[in-house]
Image: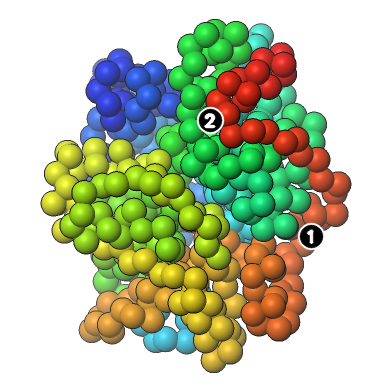
Amino acid sequence: MSVRRYLSTRDQAPAVSLDEAIAAGLAPDGGLYVPERLPRVDLSAFDPDGDLAATAATLLGPFFEDGVLVQALPAICAEAFAFDAPLRPLARPDASVLELFHGPTAAFKDFGARFLAACLRRLRTTDAPPLTILVATSGDTGAAVGAAFHRQPGVRVAILYPDGRVSPRQAHQLGSFGDNVHALRVAGSFDDCQRMVKAALNDTALQREMPLSSANSISLGRLLPQMGYYAHAALGWWRRHGAPLDFIIPTGNLGNVLACLWARGMGLPIGDIRLACNANRTLPEFFAGADYRPRDAIATLANAMDVGAPSNFERLRWTFDGDDDALRRTLRATSVDDATIRAALLRHARDHGEVVCPHTATALAVLDQAPRRDGRAWAVVATAHPAKFESVLEPLLGQPVPMPPALASMLDRPEHSAPMPADDSAFGQWLRALR
Ligand SMILES: *Cc1c(COP(=O)(O)O)cnc(C)c1O
């Protein structure tokens, strides 16, 4: 029987099954888990009347083949994809917006976090010691993971976020869970938070004392399901128009880009993939031909994309067998500064009533520069609901942005968070005290 194997991008760890890769988060050699090869799917395998959950279950089936979760995959997809990801037209006739913000925390990360939670719940045995899930967040990941695991038995969550660099509403949301979900405001940047999580996961002594896992987009259990909404949108488009759909993706840690690229690699009708980055230029410079040079993040209006060392870059390189030139030929990245984000936000709101979050606005700014092409269309990926970023939008637009009800009820709860220095050993001590 062929068992699908998952390898580490650093090649120094044994191959594992999908459930082992999902449970572990990071590979023991510090690399990221990747499938040995991308499966191909036949487009006729997808039910033309299937909803998003059905499309995702068909798409992800080959990854789960022979594994312990294969029987549960349709139910896992039904839990994770319990809300829609509609494609809505924009004023520009060759463009639409793929709205990924209809989940409980109003950002696309709800899909991956809920999928991961649904997998881990089924993988856990009842007599196992509590699992502690670590998550570094520039805002939205932490909320999505907190919501997905809140009150799940046998699981604790530690959320690390850069103090003062998330919006007030995001900070409130991160601290609103309580119970088994702990919010730590770190005196540092997102990259510090990410480093602290990686250091804890790589600390074998700590891992022996308490099982730790990650829920960042480095976890395959979050990355794989993100392919689902690209597949569903592109298939729908292809059935209606007989053409592939091109995507413009607001980009930080490259999870969303990688999911789109992998879905295309599996045979889905996806055309060009454009990365919209903020003033953090690591990726735009690399794609313009410079060496890959990770660096400290700088703060921008699109704060969930304030990333100077994108965590999935290793996976992206792996996807191209380490051939950077092939990678550069395949994807393009554009950097958008804060003034341009503001201008795009204002122009689309004023001229067309298109009110978007600052991350989605970086993609609209890239769309504004993109030429019209016969028979082709752009889908701008809307990564969060604008109401999460009221402190940016309301002064600019001079009007309130109405909140979706799930977000409003989360913000009615009290907020609790603890301070944490940007120090690996301080975080290790805090974790040990949790036991
Ligand atoms: C996380 C996030 C991004 C960046 O996504 P990556 O998968 O890390 O590239 C963009 N926009 C919003 C609103 C986010 O929360």
Q: Going 35% across and 20% down the picture, which residue do you hit? A: 29
Residue 248, picture quadrant: bottom left
Q: Going 34% across and 28% down the picture, which residue do you hit? A: 31
Q: Going 59% across and 34% down the picture, which residue do you hit? A: 422
Of the numbered discs 2 and 1, the one sitting upstream in the chain is: 2
Tag 1, which secondary structure?
A: helix
What residue sits right under mark 1 in the picture?
Answer: 408
Protein image colouring: rainbow
Q: In which quarter of the image is the C terminus?
A: top right
Position of 41 relative to 352 (above/below)? above
Q: Going 21% across and 49% down the picture, which residue do you hit? A: 291
Q: In this view, does 80 lie to the left or right of 260?
A: right
Position of 242 relative to 349 (above/below)? above
What residue sits right under mark 2 in the picture?
Answer: 196
How far apart in space, not on screen, are marks 2 and 1 (Cα)?
31 Å
Q: Is residue 422 left or right of residue 279?
A: right
Tag 2, which secondary structure?
A: helix
Amino acid on which disc 2 is placed? Met
For label 1, the crowd category at 10 Å Cα-Cα, with few meaning under 14, some 14 to 19 and many 20 or more, is some
Position of 156 relative to 287 (above/below)? above
